[in-house]
Amino acid sequence: MTPVILLAAEKQSAEVTDWAARIGWVVGLALFVALVYWLMREGWKWRGTLQGDLPELPAAPEDPGPATLAVLSMSGRYHGSTTAGQWLDRIVARGLGTRSRAVLTLTDAGVDVVRPGATDFFVPAAALREARLDKGIAGKVLTEGGLLVLTWEHGGKLIDSGFRSDHAAEHNEWVDTLNDMINKRETEGAR
């Protein structure tokens, strides 16, 4: 009989959850996530400081002239700006790094970019260098031709700005019209 009693005495109930250790791990993980977020934010602010030589963005003129396209504007998303030809070198200075909804309006004066909740800007026609369809810009990759990219000059620097229309069929019309406008301006300037 004694061996049976000894076996029963050795059995113990399952350990109760150690709440202090569990809370410690959760607090530690929360602090780690907060640290990573803070470092990302500091990196964003540092990038803005490094790009501080970028001048103020032009504002839309009071009288921009008639709209060029039959569709006066294109609504969609602004996905950011990068250094031209370097699709991962995001420009964050002057609010160009902020993704937002956008409404683009093309006139003979240039492209007016209205962004609710972010800084609006204007790309003068003289600053436009190229319009093309692409598949990506810093932070956003789409299918081939899913992004309208405008290359423009500001402060002696070439900038690529990426837009995606709510109606992707509009992209081709915008590319053709913008490139015709740029070529016409260059042809007239060469005379």
Image (cartoon, grey):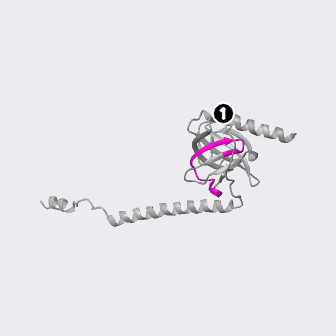
| Residue found farthest to the left | 1
Taking the magenta stretch, the answer to whether it contains residue 103 is yes
Disc 1, SS: helix
Q: The magenta stretch spans which residues?
A: 92-111
The C terminus: image quadrant: top right
Residue 55, placed above or below residue 76: below
Determine whether, in the image, residue 155 is placed left or right of residue 39. right
Determine whether, in the image, residue 93 is placed left or right of residue 127. left
Residue 40 percent coordinates (x, y): 56, 59
User: Label 1 is placed on what type of residue?
Assistant: Glu
Residue 143, placed above or below residue 10: above
The residue located at (52%, 60%) in the rendering is 37
The residue located at (66%, 63%) in the rendering is 49
Residue 124 percent coordinates (x, y): 72, 47
Q: Which residue is mark 1?
A: 173
Taking the magenta stretch, the answer to whether it contains residue 16 is no
The residue located at (36%, 64%) in the rendering is 23
Q: Quick one: 48 or 181, which is closer to the camera?
A: 181
The N terminus: image quadrant: bottom left
Residue 18 percent coordinates (x, y): 32, 64
Q: Quick one: 22 or 100, which is closer to the camera?
A: 100
Residue 3 percent coordinates (x, y): 16, 60
